[in-house]
Image: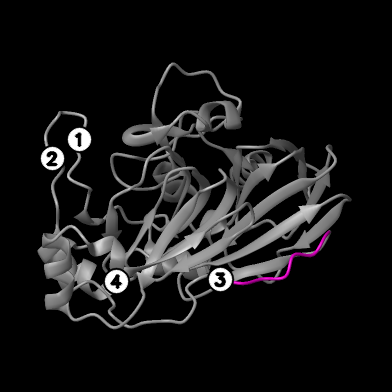
């Protein structure tokens, strides 16, 4: 009984976790992520910082507290439903269901698509990839391409790729800070130069690269394309508007997206606010995109958070006090229901 109490007490001391960022230098990457996060690194052309990942070979490692050095999978193996929630542990086991990134596009990314769960499991034995983009900052002419402008057949899609005019078929959106896009698996898209964003997605790294502007990769050779694989993965339906819309509100939670894979909420805080997580059977991810502040749980444990940092809040947490220490503290939260 005493041993059980020690395990419980130890868990309460490590309830909020930060992880070491996984920096990825990419052919299209920029130079904003390292100064944005306020870290030291000599890496160049960092296109992505994987903030929280359970993918094999790319597992996040705890950066703070007594669990420093443990991987996310090791934490789930030890703490199970206390960390990720009963339903999530039953559904996903030791596979963490979400992946969070900062993305800095200094050049256009390839035009691409991700398979849905059914297709990804059949082809690759893993989940598909639906994702959300929240624009943190954007240069004057920054834009994204998302979805088709009009109905296109699979044959017309392949012909447009062969003729180097696939971009002409896609909706093009100018973007600015605060813009939001939800991209269900199957929606063709690309992030274009001058865009800095947070991506919250299913835990999958399956990308079908459709078109890459005939540019060479880091090895000087053309990057592999997956035009044929993408053919059956693409959702060819057309929407009038692919942008997601929400109404900003200070000092209150604003839901950004709610779908079968995750829920995400925005907090723009100028004063203290308590987030009630008692009804959630899930971990909560907190990503800071502006300012600095602190997070305090119901046990009185406090952890600082600043721009560019991500914190994992375990499912056992019932209340989270968010306190700004700057003029404004902007936080994104995400969980799985």
Q: What number is the disc on residue 244?
A: 3
Q: Secondary structure at mark 1?
A: loop
Q: Are marks 1 and 2 in contact (CB under 8 Å)?
A: yes
Nearer the camera: disc 2 or disc 4: 2
| Quadrant hosting residue 316 | bottom right
Q: Which residue is mark 4?
A: 116
Looking at marks 3 and 1 on the same chain, the residue that comes earlier in the sequence is marked by 1
Q: Are marks 3 and 4 in contact (CB under 8 Å)?
A: no
| Quadrant hosting residue 162 | bottom left
Looking at marks 1 and 4 on the same chain, the residue that comes earlier in the sequence is marked by 4
Q: Secondary structure at mark 4?
A: loop
Q: Are marks 1 and 4 in contact (CB under 8 Å)?
A: no
Q: What number is the disc on residue 10?
A: none
Looking at marks 2 and 4 on the same chain, the residue that comes earlier in the sequence is marked by 4
Dot 2: few (<14), some (14–19), or many (≥20) neighbours within 10 Å?
few
Q: Which residue is mark 1?
A: 217
Is 258 on the left-hand or right-hand side of 162? right
Residue lying farthest to the right in this orientation: 271
Q: Residue 206, image x and y in percent?
A: 26, 56
């Amino acid at each position: 009984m005493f041993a059980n109490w020690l395990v419980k007490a130890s868990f309460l001391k490590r309830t909020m976790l930060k992880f070491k960022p996984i920096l990825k230098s990419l052919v299209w990457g920029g130079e904003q992520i390292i100064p944005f996060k306020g870290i030291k690194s000599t890496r160049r052309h960092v296109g992505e910082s994987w903030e929280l990942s359970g993918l094999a070979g790319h597992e996040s490692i705890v950066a703070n507290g007594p669990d420093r050095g443990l991987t996310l999978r090791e934490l789930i193996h030890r703490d199970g439903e206390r960390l990720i929630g009963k339903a999530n542990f039953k559904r996903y086991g030791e596979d963490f269901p979400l992946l969070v990134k900062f993305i800095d596009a200094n050049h256009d990314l390839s035009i691409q698509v991700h398979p849905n769960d059914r297709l990804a499991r059949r082809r690759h034995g893993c989940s598909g990839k639906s994702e959300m983009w929240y624009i943190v900052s954007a240069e004057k002419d920054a834009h994204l391409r998302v979805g088709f402008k009009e109905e296109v057949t699979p044959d017309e899609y392949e012909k447009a790729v062969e003729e180097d005019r696939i971009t002409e078929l896609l909706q093009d959106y100018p973007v600015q800070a605060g813009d939001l896009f939800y991209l269900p698996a199957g929606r063709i898209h690309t992030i274009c130069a001058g865009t800095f964003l947070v991506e919250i997605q299913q835990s999958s790294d399956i990308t079908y690269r459709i078109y890459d502007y005939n540019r060479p990769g880091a090895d000087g050779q053309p990057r592999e394309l997956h035009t044929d694989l993408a053919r059956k993965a693409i959702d060819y339906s057309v929407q009038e508007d692919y942008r997601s819309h929400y109404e900003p509100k200070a000092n209150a939670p604003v839901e950004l997206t709610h779908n079968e894979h995750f829920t995400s909420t925005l907090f723009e805080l100028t004063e203290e606010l308590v987030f009630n997580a008692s009804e959630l059977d899930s971990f909560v991810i907190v990503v800071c995109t502006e300012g600095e502040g602190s997070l305090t749980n119901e046990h009185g444990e406090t952890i600082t958070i600043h721009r560019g940092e991500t914190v994992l809040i375990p499912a056992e947490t019932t209340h989270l006090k968010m306190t700004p220490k700057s003029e404004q503290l902007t936080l994104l939260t995400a969980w799985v229901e």
